[in-house]
Structure formats: C-alpha cells, structure tokens
C-alpha cells in the first residue's frame, strides 16, 4: 500500500502539486488521470523518488520514503518496477538481456540458469518470448511495452508504476497492454499506479481512479462512479471526446 | 557531487568489471585506427620539419632523430592524441549518456535501485585510464616509425644518423612523464564528458550541445593540466 500525505511540489513560482492526499491499495490498479499539465507526471516522479517534494510524504507500507537516506531508498526501490512512457529499454542490450539485467545486478544468489529461466518466464507472461534475441530497435512500440513490463516484474516487485503505458499505441494494442497490467497486478498482488489520460484505460482496468485538476486532487473513486460523479471538471474530462458524448 | 556519486562502492563488482572490458573495447580499441594514422604522419612531419629547421653546421645531424623522439614522447603523443581522443571518445561518451538521459534509460536505472552515475561513468573512467596510456605507447612507437620512414623515403637525413639520434640519451622518465600525463588526461576526458552527458536535459538538440560542450571543456582542461603537469613533473 502507498499513502500520499499532503504532497506539495513547486517549480519556482509555479505550484504543480498543492497538497495531495490519497492511498493506493495493494492488488488494485490505481489510475491517476487529468489534463496535460495537471501534475500527473510530477506526482508519479515524487512517488518513485525521481523528484523530491517540497513538503509532505510518500509512505510505502507506512514507511516514509520521502525522508529516507539514499541507501535505505535503494532498498525500497528494489521492490519497485516501472514502465516508462517511451519504454526506456536499454538500446545496447537484447530483449532477453534487458529482462535479465535487474536480476544480474541484485540477485547474486541466483545462478545464471535461474536468472535466464526467470527472464523467460516474465517474457512468456507478456507473450513475447519469441523476440528474446532481438534488440529494442528491431521491435514495435507495443512489443517494447511488453518487454518493459517483463523487465519491471523480473525482480517480483511489490509496486508497479506505469507512466502513460498506452501512449503511441493503437486502441487494440492499448487494451491488450492495459489488461496485461491488470492481470499481473492481481496475479502478483502488487500495488499498481498508472498515470494516464486514456479514458479507455479508466473504464477497462481502473479499480481506483484519482483525478488531478490544476495540481489538486479534485476527485477520486471507482471507474463506475466517474461516469455519474456530477463534478463539472471531471465530466468535462471524461466526456471530452465527441464519440463518448454521443454514446452518453 | 556527481564525482562522489560516481566513486561510490560498486553495487555489483562483477558487472562493473565486465563493463570496464567492454568500454576498453569501445573507447580504446575502436580508436586504434585513427591513433595509428595520426601518429605515423605526425612522426614523419616532425622529422622533415626538424630536419629543415636544424640545418646548421653547429648542430649534429643526429639531433633530428633526437628532437623527433623527444617531441613525440614529451608532447605529441600524450597531448595531441589525448586531444584527438577528447573529440572522438568525449563526444561518444556525452552523446551515449545524454541519449540515455533523454530517453529515460537513466531514470529506469535509478528506479531499479542502481547508482546510475557510478554504473555508467565509472567503468568509462577506469577503462580510459587503462587503455589511453596503451594507445599513447603505440602512438610513440608509430610516431618514431613514421619519422624513420620519412627519413628513409625522403632522405632528409641519413638513416643511421636518425637511428643514432632516436637512441641518444634515452631517459625512461620521459616515458613515465608521458604516461602520467595521459592517465590524468584520460580521467579528464571521461569524467567531463560523463558529466555533460549525465546532466543533459531536453531532447536531441541538447544531446548534441552536451556532446559539443564535452569536447570543448575536455580540450581546455587538457591544455591547462598539460601546463600544470609539465611544471610539476619536468621542472
């Protein structure tokens, strides 16, 4: 479980996060949604420690991550996996080597064979084992996302963070990736936090949805509740597309 | 601060060792061709120029060989080759790490709990400090060979006099001086280029700018440290 308490972050005069309070529960797919510039990415970066908040804290199972020393923070980070918007696969490594990499760094007790078996299990889980000897430049965007998911779960993380997992993907592939993340979350009982502005994702996999608006946590609830919230800003976001308005 | 992060204890010594070997290949062996070409021609030109500028009855003919050897060992091989490597290797380091920064690969390393600065930059520094002196030793040999070839082909001085000058009053300390300078220059090239690459912000344009800054600043620091080290080691 991840608890966010009164999280604030500014860049100069610009207040990006104005005191966020929320809880992301284990075994659930938690979505952070909102317009561009609403503070989603900054919140995500504060959660994983890539940005230091000005005040407030992020607690992983009641342990304050924000105030930790770097060495303690490294220990928590070993329990995290992250899927980046651009996949962030290592160009110089093959698909298989990308997945083995986190295992190589930290699992000195595992034999080479065990590491390879684990990598193959993860690649098989995301249905991309057949591409294990290809380089990232040789595979499609959707395949890169799958490899990135396999790499993120290689070390059996407790927390999975996904930054815009569907960006640049066609709607069908996006649904496949969404469902994969949701299945893995339940299968491995992870706390998953996804940063997105894709309403399809919200409806497909959103167990808990957090709506950010101008740096504030404006609304939170389930994916069913979001359709009937009555909150103007949320409705403007949800029904922004002509197609969804017609369906409504 | 970045240097402190780079020099932190490696999280997995075995992987760092493997990376050092890979970097020695990438940064050193791949530069062997350009080092060889420049050294041979540099040695030849130094020999011919020295021969034409020391054509005086009071100067012994073998002085050409002596001056060629001293110029190559003391200055041309360690400094010029390091400047060449600052351009070739420095831009490679800065653009490689800069690209990793803008494509979030460095963030991915950090999220995994890896000391990204140490993992990416330390092996490059160590590899450069090992391989660059080897390149300079090769450069010295090839420089002298270039001078020998020039004297043999152009007959600017008799070959026997050239060889006598090359062997005349050889001081091993000069080679130590050249290698000591090279090790310092290698550290400067890899650490400065790593710094600019690691702190790249933005996109492709900024990666190019980081690469340019890495080459410019590495070259300036090499020139400054050349003066300091010469004062410290030779005077």
Image (tube, grey):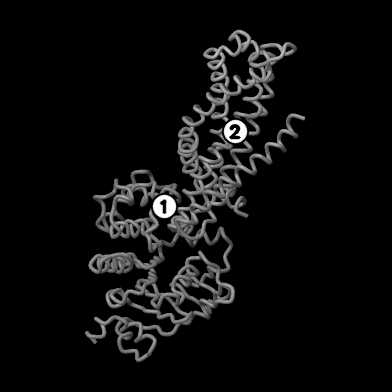
Depth check, front residue: A214 or B57: B57
Left or right: A25 as drawn, with respect to A73: left
Q: Nearer the viewer, residue A34 or B144?
A: B144
Disc sitting over residue A102 in the figure = 1
Q: Residue at x 29, y 84 (%)?
A: A224
Up/down of A211 relative to A106, above or below: below
Q: Chain of mark 1?
A: A
Residue bearing mark 2:
B80
Q: How would you rate the neighbour count of disc 2 (Cα within 10 Å): few for under 14, some for 14-19, many for 20 or more?
A: many
* In the image, residue B71 above or below residue A58: above
Circles 1 and 2 in contact, beta carbons < 8 Å: no
Q: Secondary structure at mark 1?
A: helix
Residue at point 65% right, 43% down?
Answer: B221
Residue sitting at x 66%, y 17%? B66
The answer to whether one can see residue A57 in this image is: yes
- Asked whether residue A83 is in view, the answer is no
Residue A227 vertical position relative to residue B14 in the rendered view, above or below: below
């Amino acid at each position: 479980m991840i608890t966010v308490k009164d999280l604030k972050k500014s860049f100069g005069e610009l207040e990006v996060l104005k005191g966020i309070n929320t809880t992301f529960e284990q075994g659930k797919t938690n979505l952070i949604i909102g317009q561009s510039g609403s503070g989603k990415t900054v919140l995500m970066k504060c959660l994983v420690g890539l940005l230091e908040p000005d005040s407030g804290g992020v607690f992983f199972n009641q342990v304050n991550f924000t105030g930790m020393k770097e060495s303690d923070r490294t220990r928590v980070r070993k329990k995290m996996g992250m899927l980046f918007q651009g996949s962030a696969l290592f160009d110089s490594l093959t698909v298989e080597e990308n997945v083995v990499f986190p295992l190589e760094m930290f699992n000195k007790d595992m034999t080479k064979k065990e590491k390879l078996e684990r990598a193959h299990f993860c690649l098989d889980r995301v249905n991309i084992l057949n591409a294990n000897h290809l380089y990232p430049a040789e595979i499609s965007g959707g395949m890169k996302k799958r490899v990135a998911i396999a790499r993120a779960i290689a070390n059996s993380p407790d927390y999975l963070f996904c930054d815009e997992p569907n960006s640049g993907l066609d709607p069908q592939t996006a649904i496949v990736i969404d469902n994969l993340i949701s299945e893995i979350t339940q299968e491995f009982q992870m706390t998953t936090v996804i940063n997105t502005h894709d309403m399809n994702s919200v409806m497909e996999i959103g167990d808990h949805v957090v709506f950010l608006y101008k740096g504030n946590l404006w609304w939170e609830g389930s994916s069913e509740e979001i359709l009937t919230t009555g909150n103007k800003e949320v409705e403007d976001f949800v029904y922004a597309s002509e197609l969804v308005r017609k369906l409504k | 601060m970045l240097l402190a992060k780079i020099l932190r204890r490696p999280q997995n010594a075995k992987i760092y060792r493997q990376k050092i070997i890979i970097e020695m290949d990438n940064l050193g062996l791949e530069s062997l061709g350009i080092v060889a070409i420049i050294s041979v021609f540099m040695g030849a030109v130094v020999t011919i120029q020295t021969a034409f500028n020391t054509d005086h009855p009071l100067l012994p003919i073998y002085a050409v060989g002596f001056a060629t050897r001293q110029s190559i060992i003391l200055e041309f091989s360690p400094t010029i080759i390091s400047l060449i490597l600052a351009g070739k290797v420095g831009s490679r380091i800065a653009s490689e790490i800069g690209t990793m920064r803008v494509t979030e690969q460095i963030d991915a390393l950090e999220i995994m709990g890896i000391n990204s600065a140490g993992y990416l930059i330390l092996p490059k520094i160590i590899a450069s400090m090992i391989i660059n002196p080897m390149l300079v030793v090769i450069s010295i040999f090839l420089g002298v060979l270039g001078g020998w070839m020039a004297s043999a082909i152009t007959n600017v001085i008799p070959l026997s006099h050239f060889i006598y000058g090359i062997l005349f009053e050889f001081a091993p300390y000069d080679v130590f001086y050249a290698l000591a300078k090279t090790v310092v220059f290698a550290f400067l090239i890899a650490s400065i280029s790593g710094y600019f690459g690691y702190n790249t912000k933005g996109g492709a344009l900024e990666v190019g700018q980081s690469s340019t800054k890495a080459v410019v600043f590495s070259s300036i620091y090499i020139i400054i440290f050349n003066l300091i080290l010469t004062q410290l080691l030779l005077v």
